Image (cartoon, helix red, strand yellow):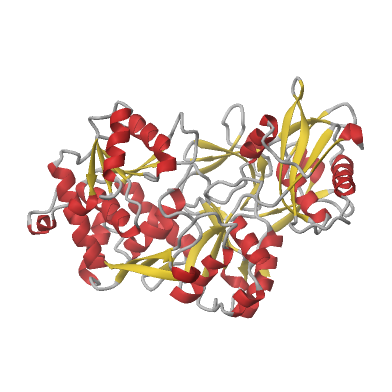
């Protein structure tokens, strides 16, 4: 276990280089011929040599202590550039240099004021031209392969101070207004112990999961955390998780991944789309910690995954529930899903009480909503606060979750020492109720109800569109299975779904839109992007198989 007396992340990494120079630091997987996975491996010694050359280069350019964009597209170059920034005491700003991300990269340069971009030789000329056309010609783009390898023989660059900025991480917000989260060198080091509590990791771990390693939580947990531990990061290629969910499991099986984080969506797709032939080739017996990033937790997804992959050696006790909101690159709460063979804390909370902002156990026969604990705090400051005043809420009272003072937009409640996520205020739908009142409907409740109503239903998105002042019309865009025969009554299916929604949730006018698989959008974290689907609906860009509104039923 790393020496906690060290004050910066780079101190600990340097010690690991001295202790285990020949050990694999990173294994970058990529798709080879025939769809198989191939590995590009870099040792601690090699990574350190490349990073020190980059660090000397950054210092020579006068960018120590300043933001530096890290834009290499290949894994080994990305890791060397990122670590080189940290060695030099610069502020590393990871970005995606692919052509379709150019507008976002330029917006980040403007926002952070970076004067140096590290890229690969193949990408540097195009990036230089893009910067010039955008009026950012003073920002220099350097090819990472040209870093002076002789620099390792020179005196090392000055180390960073604990309270200097180490990372500036930009989340998936709007291109026009990027907002970065700053982490100091001290915070980066302290956060590793939080990560270790969630991952149950050690120097012998092989860490990787279905989260992009260039951003946020994936970067911290799957790339930097192994370097702090002296472990090995196995970086899985992440494209559309719906495309080849079995590829992630094959990486676990073939490259001995023992621990890592994946969204609920990844587990769900793997359960639904891994074929029996693919399953028979998997060995998941070495998988020790399978962290599920989700708020709220979905026990049915866990249960189905555990049952499906038990034949491949997967053990349900590997599951750990985790809350990792975009406002924090570190997990903020976690809990093992099983404790001595017993399921994790779940409550049948009285529905009407929750709607009034109070959590209590439902009485027999009383309508309820099942809430599953995400555990307790693992490091960052967590508060459940009143939405209007910011005052801390008493136990059992629903409020807004705040992480280090920032609102996540999620509803949460503390109960019996556990933290429960009860909804998302940003996406709560205010709809007219049958009793001439306005109800706040949680979209995840509607989506779950629709999905469970028919085996034809896959993924869906519920949201509101303007109906009247202060009220929305409830809209559900629902994917239905491929290969539907002509005997399937889409009108009847949609009408039945709409009747179920209006009856179960006692809401007024609504609309159900049936669409093909792959229509419902998700972000890079695998989280449902209701805002994107809503935009497609309002702009007429959906291609519905069938659309039914309340007036037609």
State whether residue 164 appears in this view: no
Compared across the picture, whether 402 is left or right of 79 comes to: right
Nearer the observer, 305 or 241: 241
Q: Residue furthest front?
A: 486
How far across and how far down the image is residue 255, in percent? 44, 74
At 37% from the left edge and 44% from the top edge, which residue is drawn?
A: 95
Note whether 509 is above or below 36 in the view shown.
Answer: above
How far across and how far down the image is residue 177, in percent? 45, 29
At 91% from the left edge and 34% from the top edge, which residue is drawn?
A: 552
At 38% from the left edge and 58% from the top edge, which residue is drawn?
A: 223
Nearer the observer, 400 or 520: 520
Note whether 298 is above or below 539 in the view shown.
Answer: below
The picture quadrant where one finds residue 411 is top right
Nearer the observer, 116 or 394: 116
How far across and how far down the image is residue 322, in percent? 55, 56
Compared across the picture, whether 375 is left or right of 154 comes to: right
Q: Quadrant of the N terminus?
A: bottom left
Q: Residue furthest top?
A: 469
State whether residue 350 appears in this view: yes
How far across and how far down the image is residue 490, in percent? 85, 48
The picture quadrant where one finds residue 465 is top right
At 49% from the left edge and 68% from the top edge, which residue is drawn?
A: 35
The picture quadrant where one finds residue 6 is bottom left
Q: Residue furthest left?
A: 154
Total numbered labels: 0
Q: Quadrant of the C terminus?
A: top right
Compared across the picture, whether 298 is left or right of 67 comes to: right
Note whether 152 is above or below 67 in the view shown.
Answer: below
């Amino acid at each position: 276990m790393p020496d906690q007396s060290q004050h910066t992340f780079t101190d600990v990494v340097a010690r690991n280089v001295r202790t285990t120079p020949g050990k694999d630091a990173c294994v970058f997987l990529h798709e080879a011929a025939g769809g198989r996975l191939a590995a590009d491996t870099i040792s601690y010694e090699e990574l350190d040599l490349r990073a020190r050359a980059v660090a000397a280069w950054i210092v020579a350019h006068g960018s120590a202590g300043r933001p530096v964009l890290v834009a290499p597209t290949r894994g080994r170059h990305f890791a060397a550039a990122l670590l080189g920034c940290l060695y030099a005491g610069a502020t590393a700003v990871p970005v995606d240099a692919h052509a379709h991300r150019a507008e976002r990269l330029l917006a980040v340069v403007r926002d952070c004021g970076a004067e140096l971009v590290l890229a690969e030789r193949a990408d540097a000329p195009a990036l230089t031209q893009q910067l010039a056309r955008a009026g950012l010609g003073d920002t220099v783009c350097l090819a990472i392969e040209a870093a002076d390898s002789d620099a390792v023989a020179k005196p090392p660059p000055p180390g960073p101070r604990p309270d200097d900025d180490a990372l500036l991480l930009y989340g998936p917000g709007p291109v026009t207004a990027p907002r970065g989260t700053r982490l100091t060198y001290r915070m980066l080091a302290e956060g590793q112990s939080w990560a270790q509590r969630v991952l149950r990791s050690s120097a012998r771990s092989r860490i990787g999961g279905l989260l992009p390693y260039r951003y946020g939580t994936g970067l911290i947990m799957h790339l930097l955390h192994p370097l702090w531990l002296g472990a090995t990061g196995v970086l899985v290629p992440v494209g559309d998780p719906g495309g080849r969910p079995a590829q992630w499991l094959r990486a676990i099986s073939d490259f001995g991944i023992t621990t890592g984080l994946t969204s609920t969506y990844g587990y769900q797709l793997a359960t639904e789309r891994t074929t029996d032939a693919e399953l028979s080739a998997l060995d998941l017996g070495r998988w020790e910690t399978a962290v599920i990033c989700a708020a709220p937790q979905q026990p049915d997804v866990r249960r189905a995954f555990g049952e499906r992959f038990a034949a491949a050696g997967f053990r349900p006790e590997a599951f750990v529930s985790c809350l990792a909101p975009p406002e924090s690159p570190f997990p903020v709460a976690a809990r093992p899903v099983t404790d001595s063979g017993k399921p994790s804390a779940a409550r049948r909370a009285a529905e009407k009480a929750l709607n009034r902002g109070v959590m209590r156990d439902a009485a027999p026969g009383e309508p309820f909503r099942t809430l599953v604990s995400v555990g307790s705090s693992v490091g960052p400051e967590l508060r459940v606060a009143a939405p209007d005043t910011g005052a801390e809420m008493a136990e059992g009272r629903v409020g807004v979750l705040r992480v280090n003072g920032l609102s996540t937009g999620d509803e949460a409640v503390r109960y019996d020492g556990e933290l429960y996520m009860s909804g998302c205020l940003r996406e709560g739908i205010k709809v007219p109720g049958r009793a001439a009142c306005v109800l706040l409907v949680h979209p995840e409740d509607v989506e779950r109800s629709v999905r469970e109503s028919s085996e034809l239903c896959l993924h869906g998105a519920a949201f509101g569109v303007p109906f009247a002042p202060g009220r929305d019309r409830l809209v559900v865009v629902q994917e239905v299975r491929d290969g539907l025969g002509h005997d399937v009554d889409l009108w009847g299916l949609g009408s039945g779904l709409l009747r179920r929604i209006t009856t179960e949730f006692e809401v007024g006018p609504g609309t159900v839109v049936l669409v093909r698989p792959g229509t419902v959008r998700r972000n890079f974290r695998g989280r449902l992007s209701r805002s994107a689907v809503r935009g497609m609906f309002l702009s007429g860009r959906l291609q519905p198989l069938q659309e039914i509104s309340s007036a037609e039923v």
